[in-house]
Amino acid sequence: MAARSAPAAPHPYSIRFRDALGKQREESGYGTQDDAIERLTQLHAEKKTTAPSVAAARRELGQLTVEEYAKQWRPRQR
């Protein structure tokens, strides 16, 4: 008797992670568990290789409203 492979999951896989602001995010739609794990590994690698100053700047920028950002951005334009 030949060995049977496991049937595909009846649902897409999803991953949960924390973004630069510390908020929990979820991505779904991965066809296989390996695809989901690969994406999660990629996110963790990006997080580890980001310089602390860059991460802090992203967090700060993420907290600004559009109006606050525009006030900072406008004087830098020619």
Image: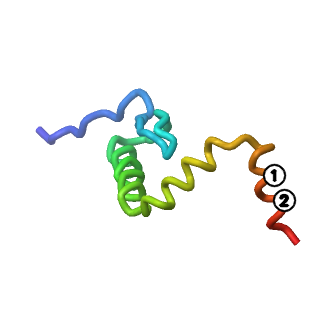
Q: Residues within 10 Å of mark 1 (few under 14, many from 20)?
A: few
> At which x and y percent is residue 8?
35, 35
Quadrant where the C terminus lies?
Answer: bottom right
Task: Look at the image and name its color scheme.
Answer: rainbow
**Regarding mark 2 in the picture, which secondary structure is present there?**
helix
Q: Which residue is mark 1?
A: 71
- The image shows residue 76, relative to residue 20, as above or below, that is below
> At which x and y percent is residue 73?
78, 58
**Regarding mark 1 in the picture, which secondary structure is present there?**
helix
Please state if 71 lies on the left or on the right of 28 as rendered: right
- At 73% from the left edge and 40% from the top edge, which residue is drawn? 65
Q: Nearer the viewer, residue 27 or 2?
A: 27
> At which x and y percent is residue 12?
44, 33
- The image shows residue 58, relative to residue 50, as above or below, that is above
Q: Residue furthest left?
A: 1
- At 49% from the left edge and 35% from the top edge, which residue is drawn? 23
Circle on res. 16? none
Q: Please report contact status of discs 2 and 1: CB closer than 8 Å, yes or no.
A: yes
- At 80% from the left edge and 66% from the top edge, which residue is drawn? 76
Please state if 6 lies on the left or on the right of 38 as rendered: left
Q: Nearer the viewer, residue 46 or 53?
A: 53
Q: What amino acid is at disc 2?
A: Arg
Quadrant where the N terminus lies?
Answer: top left
> At which x and y percent is residue 24?
46, 33
Q: Which residue is mark 2?
A: 74
Q: Residues within 10 Å of mark 2 (few under 14, many from 20)?
A: few
CA gap, disc 2 and disc 1: 6 Å
Q: Nearer the viewer, residue 28 or 76?
A: 76
Q: What amino acid is at disc 1?
A: Lys
Question: Which of the 4 image quadrants contains residue 64?
Answer: top right
